Amino acid sequence: MLAVLAGGVGAARFLRGLVQIVPTDEIVVVVNTGDDDVFHGLHVSPDIDTITYTLGNGINPDTGWGLAGDTFRVLGALERYGAPTWFRLGDADLATHLYRTERLASGSTLSEVTADIARAWGLGFTVVPMSDDPIATRLSTPDGEELRMQEWFVQLRAGPEVTAVRFEGAATARAAPGVIEALREAEAIVVCPSNPIISIGPILAVPGVLEALQARRARVVGVSPIIAGATVKGPADRLLRSLGHEVSCVGVARLFSAWCSTLVIDEADEARAPQVAAVGTSAVVAPTLMTGPAEAAALARVVLDAVGIAHT
Ligand code: GDP
Ligand code: CA
């Protein structure tokens, strides 16, 4: 069994490769829920949905979120009432949030609903939220405000400088059923090229996860989401910089080295490999830009080879 730590878009792209080269029923994906929020009374889990829709072939490929061909009539109608509509939820997408919210209200856990939604989309692998308890990523700005992840990222378009990040609720949360067991028992643990601060960070904040990873350090392999000092997409570079981390694969290696033995870095960063190694993390140099499913599968092969896992 392979355990995978995942955020949204970068993780979904990587998984599109991984499912081509190992049996899907051997994959357990632990997903960040620090971005989860409530809109119009509905529980939205952006990273879980990005993964489910991408691997279920429903994703809007132009945005990396939402469903292809979706319409926005409900949001348009909500505007009449002055409801905030900056978080874009398409009409068909809303069905997922309605279904999830109703199930949660009737006493199901987020893991149970997530598993059922994944099954309905035909995913052959296990999708587990990092926790069934609410954990909210909070970003502090220089004027002392504390923003929820979607407020900062979507409503304010990642505009305000970020001085600190914390994961509200994490200290008293419990890992979702199966998460710690998966980390303990996995033949290898793969860290997707996801945002180190706000996608991988929240997972590490769940009690027991860091210790479980540290205990398996030799079997943990990651992919740098930073290529040549920049992010492929999203605010990872800005967040790393404003929190005082080097914006490079070396900066990522420093953040991960206590619990990750091997980091796949892009061929554009080949010259940085010795510095990654100096941090205590073995560097594997390979093309890491996943322009399509074939490139993603090639990257997944490199990742599994790095920890000696068989694949096709
Ligand atoms: P989000 O929750 O949708 O922001 O998605 P993630 O946290 O999973 O992924 C965001 C990160 O994925 C960003 O830092 C990107 O640089 C990285 N990323 C996206 N596509 C690629 C790719 O093709 N290759 C690599 N190496 N990183 C990528
Ligand atoms: Ca996310």
Image (spheres, rainbow, N blue to C red):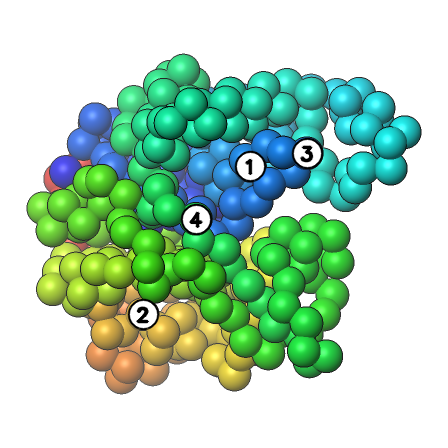
Mark 2 sits on what residue? 256
Q: Is mark 4 on a helix, strand or loop?
A: loop
Q: Upstream in the sequence, badge 4 or badge 3?
A: 3
Q: Is mark 3 on a helix, strand or loop?
A: loop
Q: Is residue 31 above or below residue 100?
A: below
Q: Upstream in the sequence, badge 4 or badge 1?
A: 1
Instruction: Say whether residue 117 is left or right of residue 208.
Output: right
Between marks 3 and 1, how big is the CA–CA gap?
10 Å
Q: Upstream in the sequence, badge 2 or badge 3?
A: 3
Mark 3 sits on what residue? 40
Q: Please identify the quarter of the rendering in which residue 258 is found.
A: bottom left
Q: Please identify the quarter of the rendering in which residue 64 is found.
A: top right
Q: Is mark 3 within 8 Å of ligand 2?
A: no
Q: In which quarter of the image is the N terminus?
A: top left
Q: Quadrant of the C terminus?
A: top left
Mark 4 sits on what residue? 134
What amino acid is at disc 4? Pro
Residue 44 is labelled as 1
Q: Which residue is drawn at 27% across and 84% down?
A: 278
Q: Give the number of callouts.
A: 4
Q: Upstream in the sequence, badge 1 or badge 2?
A: 1
Between marks 2 and 4, how big is the CA–CA gap?
24 Å
Q: Is mark 2 on a helix, strand or loop?
A: helix
